[in-house]
Amino acid sequence: MILKKGFLVKFFIFIFLTFSLYGIVKTKAVTNIIFMVPDGLAISNVTAARVYAFGTNKQRLYLETLDQIGYQSTHSLNSMITDSAAAASAWACGEKFNNGEISFHCKTRTSPRTILELAREMGKKSGLVATSSITHATPAAFGAHVSDRDCENEIARQYIVKNGIDILLGAGKGIFQSSEMGADPCGTYGDFIELAKERDYTIVNTREEMFRSHKTAKKLLGLFRHVSLTPAHRRAKVKKSQDEPRLAEMTGVALQFLETHQKGFFLLVEGSQIDWANHANNLEYQISETLEFDKAVKVVLDWVNQDKNRKESTLIVIVSDHDCGGFAIKGPWGKTLTQPGQYVNAGWIWGSHTGEDTIIWSQGPYSSHLGKAIDNTDIFHIMKAALYGKEYQKQ
Ligand SMILES: [Zn+2]
């Protein structure tokens, strides 16, 4: 009897330890991943935008309020200076690519599955939102595989036919309808808007149509301009732009569209034109696009903060693909501080990308792995571990 009692005690201790240990080791998979890209943004751009918005008081931009801050190296497979195609492909697939390649290795003609495709295989929904054409390099690397970033007709075709991406919002009407004369470098052309209709997409071309349709649409394709959306600082001057949604509005609609799906989603949101502003060495353009992007970050933060469960099961990653222009703040010098609404004195070293590291802001499960000095390819592996609820092992 005494022996039996001892055995029972040991047995219960064993069971207790096994379950507690399981609780410690077991990691919970995330339901949603929201991946946000301020394309071509450097930390100096954040400073300039913040000083313009708030002066030098302690107020921060929304993107600066995320829990974890780290940084990533950005070089591509064949160049110290990456382009957006290789950079986004590194995030999407966890491997280095040559500049110009969209999640496709030209040399071996192989295309690893992207994080969006892995999420889809798990029954999750997917969405791409951008202020450029929706087939531009950054969103493309998540939803397509092509040898050349200029194969935008083929990218459009793959979005609709191959991946059936649930919500696509941005510009690029012209790219979705091309004739044989306008075939892309991959030789693809066609009417992909018609094709999208056949595949259960609702097509919208204005912000009003977008707000009217997103609650009932099965899939949604929003193409609001021919090539790219009107830059934020030009909206007041371009009358037609009133029909276009803002980045924050598209982000809100995408979240409302995707949130009803119980298995969760992968959503990419790109502020595409911060990069273009830096290429153009235009400070007003750069700051307004950074602040425009930050409003989309606010929409995402408000959305996760609405619900404790949602917050605990959503990984948010905000990361720029590369710096552009080598922007630096040079003043004002002396006993002067810049006031809200004033521009800092600044300059660029040139009108192309540079090879410096870029900041990663993140929060939610697995984000502690992102608050470090890592490579852009590591971000894929961290997101993959988060999707599967596996422990993250550094590659
Ligand atoms: Zn660029």
Image: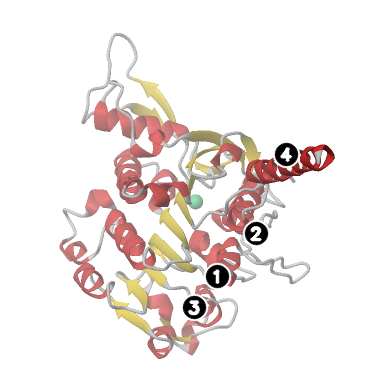
In screen coordinates, is 244 left or right of 357? left
- Farthest residue in the top direction? 335
Image marks 4 and 3: residues in contact by CB distance under 8 Å: no
| Residue at x 64% of width, y 38% of height | 374
Check the image and report above or below for 74 versus 67.
below
Query: What residue did someone put label 1 on?
Result: 120
Q: Is residue 175 visible?
A: yes
In screen coordinates, is 43 left or right of 90? left
Query: What residue did someone put label 4 on?
Result: 13
Q: Nearer the viewer, mark 2 or mark 1?
A: 1
Give, as a three-letter code, the residue at label 3: Gly
| Residue at x 40% of width, y 34% of height | 64
Label 4 residue SS: helix
Q: How is the image coloured?
A: secondary structure
Label 3 residue SS: loop
**Mark 1 vs 3, N-terminal side:** 1
Label 2 residue SS: helix
Query: What residue did someone put label 3 on?
Result: 164
Q: CA distance from mark 1 to mark 3?
A: 9 Å
How crowded is the residue under tag 1: few (<14 C-alpha within 10 Å), some, or many (20+)? Answer: many
Label 1 residue SS: helix
Query: What residue did someone put label 2 on?
Result: 93
How crowded is the residue under tag 4: few (<14 C-alpha within 10 Å), some, or many (20+)? Answer: few
- Farthest residue in the front direction? 1
The tag on residue 234 is: none
| Residue at x 58% of width, y 76% of height | 185
